[in-house]
Image (cartoon, rainbow, N blue to C red):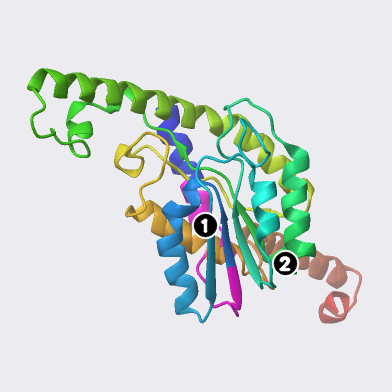
Amino acid sequence: TKAADAATKANQQLADAPDQQAAKINFGKVLIFGHSQAGRYASQLGSKIKSQGGKVVKKIYSGLADEDANNKEGLKTKIKTITGEFTHAYLFLNGNTAADGNLYEKAKRSIIEHTTGNLKVPKQNIVVILPPVNLSDPNDYNLDHVKKYYKQKKDETSEKYNARLNAVLAGIRRNASYSSRRGEGINKRARTYFEGLGVKVLNPITSTNISDFPDGYHISRLSALAGTAADQMIGSSHRVAVRSKSDTAQNVSSSRALESTARKAGLDPQQALS
């Protein structure tokens, strides 16, 4: 299917990117900040950072968008309550909005500016992580899946239990559909905006496996996908003197062409390359 092909392509891009692989980094004080998806990654990401000598500060605010909205403070307000200096920041942003909703550009800029200006994180040490995208068919979710997470309550009749299961299933399917639409919707727009600010954005985290998204749109904290994504987040913080395969191939091709031209002109190829 197109969804499966898209997921495979995105995950292969992550695997192939040399600057996305786990690397030894000189971590100091590290901020993990953002909406509820941050909590799903925080355990594995935090452990990996600590194993490399870093100190982790987690600030997670479930249900909040980047901007103040729906009578709730947004992440742009919450981050201003954080003080101190950090060496790295993992910012989980762009959540809790409609798939084609308001991008809240001013709030996003404010969060980045506070991170670099007040928290003293070098821009190159900031990684923005957008919500993961569930590319499975919503109809792949069934009552057997729901029963893994919702058990029959004491004194709950079978009729009421089945009604509750079906209501939950309908919600999960809606969540899965919403998550899928985000990928080509607001996530794509957010990526363009953040990259325009000169901020690194993690490659899309996608899956067609319903077990990776038990409720349809939140990633499972115990999934292998969350662990792999955590490695990629750390790898995104380590981009020093790392060239992609395409860059390397292009440089080799250019060098060979220059050597050939130099020989034809009767020049020393090594001098032409120096």
The spot of residue 88 in percent (x, y) is 64, 68
Which residue is drawn at the image coordinates 33% and 52% (left, top)?
223
Report whether 154 appears left or right of 168. left
Residue flagged by tag 2: what amino acid is it? Leu
Task: Please give the residue where the numbered disc 2 appears in the rendered image.
Answer: 119
Q: CA distance from mark 2 to mark 1?
A: 32 Å
Q: Nearer the viewer, residue 43 or 249?
A: 43
**Amino acid at the residue labelled 1:** Asp
Please indicate whether residue 140 sits to the left or right of residue 63 in the image: left
| SS at badge 2 | loop
The picture quadrant where one finds residue 250 is bottom right
Across and down, in percent, residue 259 comes to: 80, 70
What residue does disc 1 label? 16
Provide the residue span drawn in magenta.
Answer: 11-30
Q: Nearer the viewer, mark 2 or mark 1?
A: 2
Task: Give neighbour class at mark 2: few <14, some 14-19, many 20+ (Cα, 10 Å).
Answer: many
Position in image of residue 183 (x %, y %):
55, 34
Q: Is residue 85 above or below residue 171?
A: below
Image coordinates for residue 164, horizontal then vertical, percent: 22, 23
Q: Residues within 10 Å of mark 1 (few under 14, many from 20)?
A: few
Residue at figure coordinates x 48%, y 30% from the top left: 180
Q: Which mark is residue 78?
A: none
Viewer-closest of 208 and 71: 71
The part of the image, by quadrant, that contains residue 199 is bottom right
Q: Is residue 228 magenta?
A: no
Quadrant of the frame with the N terminus: top left
Decide: is 45 above or below 77.
below
The tag earlier along the polypeptide, 2 or 1, is 1
